[in-house]
Image (spheres, grey):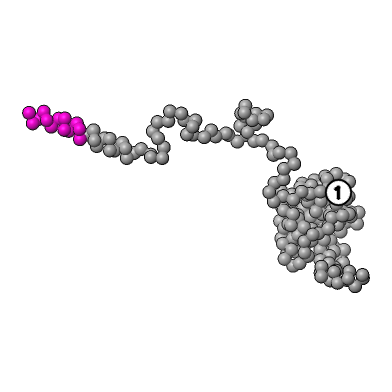
Amino acid sequence: MITNMKRPVNILITLIITIVMVSCWTDNKKPNFQYMPNMYEPVGYKTYGEYKGFPRQMEAMLPVSGSIPRGWIPYGYKNTPEGKALATKELKIPIEVNEENLSKGKELFNIYCAICHGKKGDGQGTLVKREKFLGIPSLADKGRNITEGDIYHVMMYGLNSMGSYASQTNEKERWQITMHALDLKSKLNGEPLWSSTQNDPTEKETTSEKAN
């Protein structure tokens, strides 16, 4: 009789232990059974995947026409000969000409420009000496009207074999590079540094007031 009683008790104990162990393995944050999984699990789209619900059936849609990326300042000169000529004539450096900007401009020039244009701006960079590129002009080339706007415009859009650097540099960095390039041009021409000829803004205001 006792033996017959032990068997149900053992079965009951085993069942309780099993239930306890299984309950410990479950994740309380995620149910074991999902009767409507689409209501629990978000639908993930693959990058550049094709789906019927999107325009052109492309997951990666283009931005709305006229939208401007955060931090991007629109550039008002077109990538045309006329746009370049206008930028060459009109564009002026909007940031202060100081040692900090000149030093940063030199650093950036040596990173992005010197490989072709040379650290002196004479068109004798490493790639030119190795004959990977030929015909890189000097910044002192008399046949080119190199101005603040001209340098900036070329960095924005590129020119001939030179590509655009608009994605590698921001607006301030392009102006800093421009400052250093103009100083290099002055050195090559044996002239006073361009940066040394830029009057302090307060001096310009004083001169203007005296003139009036």
* Number of numbered discs visible in the structure rendering: 1
Give the amino acid at mark 1: Lys
Answer whether residue 100 is visible to the viewer in this image. yes
Name the residue furthest top. Answer: 52
In the displayed structure image, the side of residue 61 where residue 136 appears, left or right:
right
- The spot of residue 137 in percent (x, y) is 84, 53
Q: Which residue is mark 1?
A: 84
Who's the residue at 72% across and 45% down the image?
Answer: 68
Could you tell me which quadrant the N terminus lies in? Answer: top left
Q: Nearer the viewer, residue 171 or 138?
A: 171
Q: Is 62 located above or below residue 72 in the figure?
A: above
- The spot of residue 134 in percent (x, y) is 81, 49
Could you tell me which quadrant the C terminus lies in? Answer: bottom right
Q: In terms of image quadrants, where is residue 190?
A: bottom right
Q: Circle 1 sits in a helix, a strand or a loop, which is it?
A: helix
Name the residue furthest front. Answer: 212
Answer whether residue 133 is visible to the viewer in this image. no
Q: Is 27 located above or below residue 114 in the figure?
A: above
Who's the residue at 88% across and 50% down the image?
Answer: 86
Please provide the residue range marked out in magenta: 1-13
Crowd tier of the residue under label 1, counting other residues whose Cα lies within 10 Å: few below 14, some 14–19, many 20 or above: many
- The spot of residue 157 in percent (x, y) is 79, 47
Q: Nearer the viewer, residue 198 or 1?
A: 1
- Classified by dominant secondary structure, the portion drawn in magenta counts as helix
Q: Is residue 125 magenta?
A: no
Who's the residue at 76% across and 59% down the image?
Answer: 176
Who's the residue at 49% across and 30% down the image?
Answer: 38
